[in-house]
Image (spheres, helix red, strand yellow):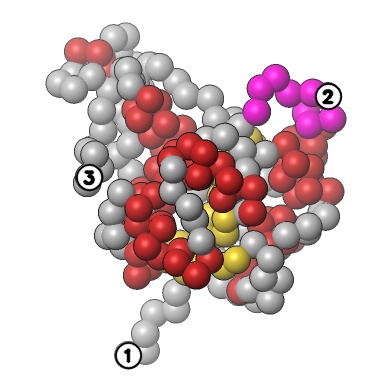
Amino acid sequence: MGTAKRQPWVVGVSGASGTPYAASVIRALLAAGEAVDLIVSRAARLTILDETGIAFRDAHWRADLGSWLGSDDGLDDVRYWPAGDFAAGPSSGSYPAKGMLVVPATTGAVAGIALGLSKDLLQRAASVTLKERRPLVVCVRETPLNGVTLKHLVELDAQGAVVLPASPGFYAGGSTVRELVDFVAGRVLDAVDVPHSLYLRWEGELGAAARRPGGGRGVPVEGE
């Protein structure tokens, strides 16, 4: 029998504050046995450095990604594409990707994707995802939002994308930053039907999460 064809989720990390959301999504995808193609914009490198102290470098992406995620587990299922590489796999509709998750998404990335500008590989891969009618989740991280950005988000919705603001819910009993980050990451994965245990789901019982051992915690992530 032949080897199964690799079919990854493309994860695009733009320069918005909120890189922990991206790290949680990537960890959960790998834990679910999914392959990941990673695109980190130039601005996102600065944000990762600012928020984590980790310098994300093209030439050392594997070691830097392991430091960012807190573990090297599953990295054999990750392929990294530099943001300036327009010959990369995800730039073509014939590349066998399952879909794309842009997390976090800047308002600039939102505009570029909505207008089809393809200024870098992240925007190009998102445009490809839309034209191929594959799932696209745009996790916008900005507040407040002006009218222009709202129009761009409506346009993305009209084109078939899932617009998912980085807006954590508190009904799952989360009380730490990590728990609230995982809630948003879990909702991103819910949008593309990837199983996870990042948060406790609502089951119609008021206060249930707070009464459970550990509050709103899902399955602990290794290294936590």
Image location of residue 73, percent across then percent down: 27, 60
- Tell me which amino acid carries mark 1: Met
| Magenta highlight on residue 146 | yes
Decide which of 196, 144 is in the foreground and name it: 144
Classify residue 100 as left or right of residue 156: left
Using a 10 Å C-alpha cutoff, classify the residue at mark 1 as few (fewer than 14 neighbours), some (14 to 19) or many (20 or more).
few
Confirm whether residue 129 shows in the render. Answer: no
Disc 2 secondary structure class: helix
Disc 3 secondary structure class: loop
Q: Which of the two discs, 2 and 3, sits closer to the camera?
A: 3
Image location of residue 66, percent across then percent down: 35, 57
Who's the residue at 83% across and 55% down the image?
117
Looking at the image, which residue sits at the far bottom? Answer: 1
Quadrant of image for the C terminus: top left
For label 3, the residue is 223
Q: Which residues are magenta?
A: 142-150
Classify residue 60 as left or right of residue 140: left
For label 2, the residue is 147
Using a 10 Å C-alpha cutoff, classify the residue at mark 3 as few (fewer than 14 neighbours), some (14 to 19) or many (20 or more).
few
The alpha-carbon separation of the residues under discs 2 and 1 comes to 54 Å
